[in-house]
Image (cartoon, grey):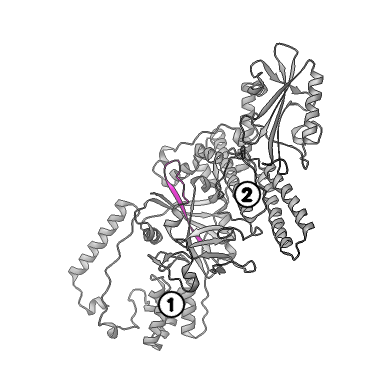
Amino acid sequence: EEDEENGSSEEEEEEEEASNQSDNENIASNGLSVSKPGKPIDLKGKIAALDITAKDRASGRNVAHFLVDPCGWQNVELVEALVRVYKNKFTQLLTMGDSNGETPIGLAARMNQHKMYQAMIKTANRPTSDQISGLKFEIPACTTHDVKSDSDNLVKEFAETLKEKDEKKSQIPHKKSGYDKTGEIMECTDTNQLFQVLLNKTDLRGGLYGFHNYYKMELIKRKDADLFILFTNWGRIGDQYGEFQCTPFTNIDAGVKEFKSVFKQKTGQEWCPSADFVEKQGKYRLTKTEDNVQTVADVEIENFKLEKKDENLLEMKFISDISNVKHLRRYAHCVRLSNNSNVSCPFGRVGKEEILKAREILHRLAKNIEGMEKARNKNPPIMDDVFRLTDEQYTLTSSFYTTIPVGGYAHSSIRVINSARELQAAYEILNTIGDIEIAGRLVSAATYAMKKRNEDPLRYILSSVDCSIQMQSPQEELSQRVMQWIAASNPSVDVRALFSISSRRASIAMEKHKDCANITYLLHGTKAENLLSILHYGLKATPSNALQCGQAFGSGVYFADSFEKSEGYCGESSQGLKYMLVCKVALGSVLTKDEIEKKDKFDTRKVQGAKEPSGGMTIQGAEMPLGPLVDHKFTGTGAHWWRPPHNEFIVKDESRILPHIIIAFKN
């Protein structure tokens, strides 16, 4: 209407159409890039002539509708300004329907714009039947694959294949014994298993560095003589050499008697089938031996190749990249934690049962540390409780590292888990091992499906993660807004693809928070090796019963509202790409204080940075902070404190996190 009033020429319209076409061609040729904004309209001197009650001919919408959509900035200040200038003339627009009968208030409710909805309700000052719809998302269907069964079958079949191929192979003695070519490990006729064990024990009361040892034992018979040797090898877990001893016997009975005697001394129980072994407190536990096929770690798994039909599908390239077995194994052997120490755990060695047991131990340690702090803060301190809880810390920490016998402490001490910082490091170990366990289970199951049912292994993984993955079109508004967000802090990043994802478990968990009034898009940098687990289970936070003090900014899942901040946490994949998650986060109660008090109850802690986005836009029910970065103005005494460069958000409850987009990029 305004164009007609101002006499806009056909030539100008053609020029504008040509400009828009050029922009679209730019997106198509260069992949993901930000569309150029249109030219601003010069309203100088025309404000008084504006008809605030004008409606769009096609949709019947008025200016209040357009404040909600497509201008989803939730500009409450502009609504207040229009009320001041136009008073009732603007207020009545809030309850006027468009061609479909939808009012601006109803539109704000449907678009999940909480701030705009509340501002319009307050301004209209009349009852309405329109209610906030809440965040909308679909829950993907559950996979039809039995991943655990397929993975277990692969391990079992591989063991049987090796046995058929070379029945004597598993009876070859350890090379340190000196009898690897001239001897063989004897078999126990009573238990139908070899006289061969690998034990481990952790007791932090033992010595300066703590007791974190393995003990290996084999009963060997020389092939060319009636000579029996008890080979024992012991040392610190992670030390590839250790100490060893060979004790000869001239008859089998003496050798078997000594083997069983040492076994009982170390484990506290009689020699028995491994399935009947019961772990005893303070004694060695039976460990899955690396010489026998018992877990995914023992199975030979090759990298999967893309089918020709999938070579141009970016979704399949993505699955191939994050399922690279070579990279997963390497990651498992060298995991860097927040306390700058490296630990190793063979890919697929630790199973789900051990992880659950270790997590329960950490839950008990969290309560112990809390109790210890209370006992020490008493005036005077309750020393009996302090001594009792200290002893319990040693016992529980020993149990944790016995259950999860990670390497990396061959030449260093293991710290007792007696603080929130040490507890957080232990949870990081467990979460990482959990990621590795899930990845190992998926790739081994896919291998079995490929060999036995001729299924495409990569498509098997894609359909087994319980997460839908789709390529985002560059022309979609969400893609353009994400690119705008990225460019606000790093305009030179090379974005290769955007994938929309919907995790079944994360979606089900988010159901109870879908009506949250401050759902926000936030960024989370991660490594490619963690993505199979994230797609399957969602992001994991330190459990809520862990302490929130004694760490940099507390426990939880860390996010940022600027790409530049999260970029530093992204590791390179096998194809040289980096991946970042865009998540919808139900912030809930946000603590923005500089000093955290234990009595404060909150869902998210915001650490104010020196720079922050200047504004945000509501897209698909959540606010995206995509404005240009500006300096935050600090006041009072806080103006002189050190601040991180960017905002950080620490979310305590993982159910408040819904991964939504994966950004694939290169620096």
Quarter that holds the N terminus: bottom left
Decide if residue 572 is on the left or right side of residue 336: left
Q: State the mark number for residue 534.
A: none
Q: Nearer the viewer, residue 370 or 528?
A: 370
Q: Nearer the viewer, residue 617 or 58?
A: 617
Name the residue rendered at 64%, 19% in the picture: 180
Q: Is residue 62 visible?
A: no
Neighbourhood count class around disc 2 (C-alpha, 10 Å): few under 14, some 14–19, many 20 upward: many
Q: Which residues are magenta?
A: 569-584
What percent of the width, then of the height, locates residue 378? 74, 65
Mark toward the start of the polypeptide (1 vs 2): 1
| Residue 424 sits inside the magenta stretch | no
Q: State the mark number for residue 426.
A: 2
In the picture shown, does residue 298 fall above or below 657?
Answer: above
Q: Amino acid at mark 2?
A: Ala
Q: Which residue is mark 1?
A: 76
Determine which quarter of the picture holds residue 291: top right
In the picture shown, does residue 215 fall above or below 205?
Answer: above
What percent of the width, then of the height, locates residue 350? 64, 41
Neighbourhood count class around disc 1 (C-alpha, 10 Å): few under 14, some 14–19, many 20 upward: some
Decide if residue 629 is on the left or right side of residue 416: left
State if disc 2 and disc 1 touch (CB < 8 Å).
no
